[in-house]
Amino acid sequence: MVKHLTALAFGAALLLPASAQGAPATTAKATLVEYSSPMLPPANYRGQWWTTPDHCQYSRAGRPGETVWYLIVNTAHEGCKRRLIQRAYSDYE
């Protein structure tokens, strides 16, 4: 009985489109998009941490080529954004 249910589930999974199975649905090439804001550091800033003018503290992260600043939670206060995006790929939807 278990073998039959496993085979049935496997067969049903084969009928799903690739996007439902976790594979990328498109192969479109993503481009880097740059953002500017007085809250962001200069484009040539290479440090790991950044403090905005309103005293919110962030740590640098992101995929290779990206620059995304994530809020350091234990230093956060009201008015801090969760993340600041400086450079990111256009494939986010």
Image (cartoon, grey):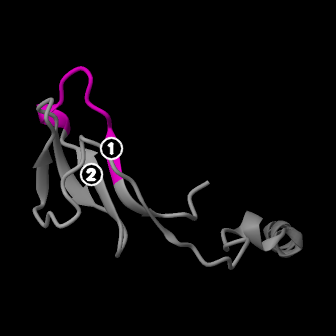
Q: Which numbered circle lies on residue 83? A: 1
Q: Nearer the viewer, residue 28 or 17?
A: 28
User: For residue 77, which quarter of the picture?
Assistant: top left
Q: Residues at badges 1 and 2 in contact (C-beta under 8 Å)? A: yes
Quadrant into which the N terminus falls: bottom right
Above or below — where is 75 with respect to 48? above
**Residue 14 relative to residue 61: left or right:** right
How far apart are the two marked residues, 1 and 2, measured between alpha carbons? 5 Å
Q: Nearer the viewer, residue 71 or 53?
A: 53
Above or below — where is 34 with respect to 51? below
Queried whether the magenta region covers residue 82, the answer comes back as yes
> Within 10 angstroms of label 1, few (less than 14), some, or many (20 or more) residues?
some
Q: Secondary structure at mark 1?
A: strand
Magenta highlight range: 73-85
Q: Which numbered circle lies on residue 41? A: none
Q: Which residue is mark 2?
A: 69
The amino acid at mark 2 is Trp
Above or below — where is 75 with respect to 51? above
**Residue 80 relative to residue 25: left or right:** left
